[in-house]
Image (cartoon, rainbow, N blue to C red):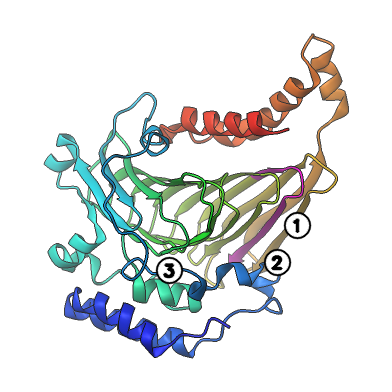
Amino acid sequence: MYKISSTAKDREIEVLADKSPTWLAELRRDAWQRAETLEAPSRKDEYWRYTDLDLLNPESFQRLEHGGSTAPLKRLPQRASSALELSGTGSGGKIIHADGALFSAGLSEEAAAKGVIFTDLETAVTEHEELIRPRLGKLVGAADIFTARNLALHRGGAFLYVPPGVELSAPMQSLHWLGMQGTLIQPRTVVVVGRGAKVVFNDIYTSAPLARASLVNPVTELYAAEDSQVGWVTWQDWGEGVRHLSTVKATMAANARLNTMLVTLGGEFSRTWKECELAGEGAQSVMLGLYFAHRKQHFEHWTVQDHLAPHTRSDLLYKGALDDQARTVYYGTIKVRPDANNTDAYQANRNLALSGSARANTNPQLEIENNDVRCSHGATVGRVDEEHLYYLMSRGIGRADARKLLIFGFFNEVLGRAQWSGMHELLSESILRKLAAEK
């Protein structure tokens, strides 16, 4: 399964390595060698037992450098440009990639004057080696065949650096647009936030519907230094026919504050592994998630709240709705390490099943190696309350509209906690559009 040929190696690795600095070329080749030795996962593995791995075979998709059209995008489609329209705030900077290639990049005067770096990864590895070399691949290395391939073959992605003490008033935005069919895209993003700095980073993935499936395998690594405050939204709103396999990991130093929100709405298949490492004393993490699956969509969310240091706190709330024959998976783990005294951790997953054929699997876990902790978790799968529907209908609201109001209200608890992102209206509108598409 997922057999890698020497021809593929010559075609991909050597072309990319020749375009990379020496240190990155070595990193790419080492990761590729690791990928060659790794076995592909199987459904016998605990972390892959819900996944149809045939959907994710990289050998089933074209490489961008070889085969398929590589004509540059001349104009950003409306679906993509509208995803960048924030409410109540401007933008501190925008980087847009189309089919794995840089389309445009810009930085506000405020951000530039404060020494912020926001550029494509290809530029960063040559112009900012001292910042990115110690970090690229350190949080997410070649742990499995997919992360190994990304580290070896990544193309596209952003690098954000916020210097110590810098506070930005407007979010930084990264957008990935996919227009090519039957292709494999593997972007990689690195975010570094200095001590006492404050920033919001919005990472957006979108496309038109595709007649032939494409696979996107992104990796994001985020470093939050001491006393920093970071807001981080990942919004996946692919069109039909896109398969999304994402790995994101953040590490937090002492007294860092990290608010994250993961939104999954589009694509044929989506699986995200998201891990927050509370490595410094006093670090705090809030992890929010929102997903809405319908028709035959399959969404998986795997989360880790990893407490390494004392006096750390994490709070997770993931809410999902599913209709028709959709399938969703939530598998969350709270880890408390031996030295993590006075840990306070909470995890909740709430699911709203809208049809008898939809299936939600939820599995919260605790791995505690310290007695001085306060940890709790919970999960529910329920249906729309008929009494609530009746109440709305008794006020003259039709059943279909009443149902939509209840679903949107279910999500609004999560949306309301992410006002800091500037994306509240965008996300609300995208949910309403999906509700409108419901039969």
- How crowded pointer 2 is (Cα within 10 Å; few <14, some 14-19, many 20+) is rated as some
Nearer to us of marks 3 and 2 is 3
Of mark 3 and mark 1, the one earlier in the sequence is 3
Residue at image mark 3: 62
Residue at image mark 2: 50
Per the model, the C-alpha gap separating discs 3 and 1 is: 33 Å
- How crowded pointer 1 is (Cα within 10 Å; few <14, some 14-19, many 20+) is rated as some
Q: Are marks 1 and 2 in contact (CB under 8 Å)?
A: yes
Tell me: residue 67, above or below residue 101. Answer: below
Q: Secondary structure at mark 1?
A: strand
Three-letter amino acid code at the position of disc 1? Asn
Quarter occupied by residue 168: top left
Per the model, the C-alpha gap separating discs 1 and 2 is: 9 Å
Q: Position of residue 294 (x, y in %)?
A: 69, 44
Disc number placed over residue 361 in the picture, else none: 1
Quarter occupied by residue 431: top right
Q: Position of residue 100 (x, y in %)?
A: 33, 58
Nearer to us of marks 3 and 1 is 3
